[in-house]
Amino acid sequence: MTSDVQAIARASARLGFWAAVGCVVAFLVFTGAFVGLLWVRPLYLWTDLAGYVVFVARYPTPLPDLARLAMLGFGPLFVVLLNSIYDSAAPARKSLARLSLCFGLGFAVLTGAHYFIQLTAVRVSVAQGVVAGLDQVIQANPYSAVSAMNMLGWTLFLGLASLCAAPVFAGGALAKTIRIALVANGLICLAGGVGYLTQNTVLVFVTMNPGMGGAILVATVALAVYFRRLAAASRVPAG
């Protein structure tokens, strides 16, 4: 390995490591905010826009916006992580890694647009009492147009990105852990999409919360270890 190629590999591995760590932190912040909400206010189930506005006014808390901010950051971090996976992939598996990166970009755009809308247009409109028409862009309405866009990202695009990235990893126990976690996440996300299409609330909750969250945490923690080792290996001079 030439010094230039070695430096590029090391830089990509470092990016992959920090992106994986960032993904873990984002999901831990999201999980903490979600659990915190269960302590500070009752569970909200959508009825109509007027009821939601009254609920928010009665139980003010920054936790929902903190969770959305964490997930807004997760999308770009996940793309950086997939880029490092592509860089590290064996030549025979680069095509799948490239597909994973493309699906990951779709995921980041769809979910990022959703969370940005919630943090800006929806938050400001509700605060100012200008709520006409918000029922189709508000996250609290699980079947609003923007919520459907968000679910498309989390189910189809994240699921396909995970399934395409999984075969990149082959070999020892760490690679096997990453591969299994990614396959599990892909199947869980796609199952969540089926649940959303069929209006199966229980299936959506189980897959898109503990199911997907657990699989993503296992995968990203393992990927942080993987890229840490890869960065260390790239510092070893070629014999």
Image (spheres, rainbow, N blue to C red):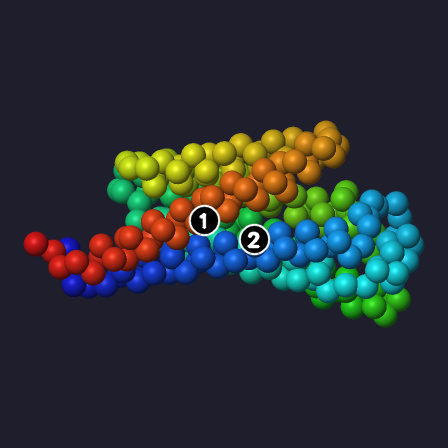
Q: Residue at x 29, y 53 (%)?
A: 229
Amino acid tagged 1: Thr
Q: Residue at x 91, y 52 (%)?
A: 51
Q: Is residue 10 left or right of residue 107?
A: left
What residue sits right under mark 2 in the picture?
27
Q: Quadrant of residue 166?
A: top left
Q: Secondary structure at mark 1?
A: helix
Mark seen at residue 220: 1
Q: Residue furthest left?
A: 239
Res. 221 visible in picture: yes
- Residue 38: x and y in percent read 75, 51
The image shows residue 55, relative to residue 222, as above or below, that is below
Amino acid tagged 2: Phe
Q: Residue at x 8, y 54 (%)?
A: 239
Res. 83 visible in picture: no
- Residue 91: x and y in percent read 26, 42
Other residues around mark 1 within 10 Å, as few (<14) / some (14–19) / many (≥20): many
The image shows residue 134, relative to residue 98, as above or below, that is below
Q: Quadrant of residue 134?
A: bottom right
Q: Is residue 159 left or right of residue 13?
A: right
For the image, the number of numbered tags is 2
Q: Evaluate if marks 1 and 2 touch, with contact meaning CB atoms under 8 Å apart.
A: yes
For marks 1 and 2, give the CA distance: 10 Å
Q: Nearer the viewer, residue 174 or 201?
A: 174
- Residue 194: x and y in percent read 65, 31
